[in-house]
Image (cartoon, grey):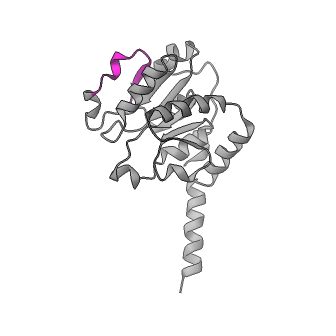
Amino acid sequence: VDYEHFSRSFPPEDIPVELRAIVAAERPIIGYFGALVSWFDYELVLAAAEARPDYDIVLIGWDYDRSMNAYPLQEHANIHLVGPIPYRDLPRYACRFDVSTIPFRINEITESASPIKLFEYMALGHPIVTTALPECRKYRSVLIGEDHAGFVDQLDRALSLRGDAAYAGTLRQEALENTWDAKAAVVAELIRKNWR
């Protein structure tokens, strides 16, 4: 993660136009940014929207393979499709999330994935809820939803962690352990130890 890029703060009044009405509603904002693709669990998002109609779900990204068209996301008033946002502007949007999520299906692709957005979410400093991705299980800051009901329960739990100093410290620590500089240092040390 580029920690400095994602850990920036923005003035309360600096709200992107696409999010102004959502933020003004003063309801919990459950967010995601990235590709909307076949391994994205649209059914899970629909289940969460129905189970928690008082939460707003914001999806930032592009419909990569048109898989989104098979699901009635736009029929739910609490699901908001923002579309793709340039990387340079992404923190200005994502800083408005109350909870950051990775709602991916568990399959051969996602079981071998290490989503960089996980570390970007850590740098944002917001609670994180994901499905049971092996890579996400490695981190203390990540709340895992084992199934649809469990995912919704973890959203509730995540909202209760906002403002928790110990949890915020865990997010920051894990983000800093996964910066590009930190990872480069690990690789450099391995090369140094194994150079013959």
Question: Measured from the top left, where is residue 58 in percent x and y?
Answer: 46, 26
Residue bounds of the magenta highlight: 71-84
Residue lying farthest to the bottom in this orientation: 196
Displayed quadrant of residue 33:
top left
Residue 158 versus residue 82: which sits nearer the camera?
158
What residue do we see at 59% from left, 15% from top? 26
176 left or right, relative to 88: right
The residue lying toward the viewer, choosing from 120 and 109, is 109
The residue sitting at 35% across, 31% down in the picture is: 43
Looking at the picture, tell me which residue is in the foreground, 137 or 124.
137
User: Is 186 within the magenta?
Assistant: no
Q: Is residue 50 above or below residue 175?
A: above
Q: Position of residue 185 (x, y in %)?
A: 60, 65
> In the shown orientation, is residue 65 left or right of residue 122?
left
Whether residue 74 is in magenta: the answer is yes
| Residue ID at (43%, 37%) | 103
Measured as percent of width and height from the top left, residue 39 is found at 33, 42
Name the image quarter holding residue 67.
top left
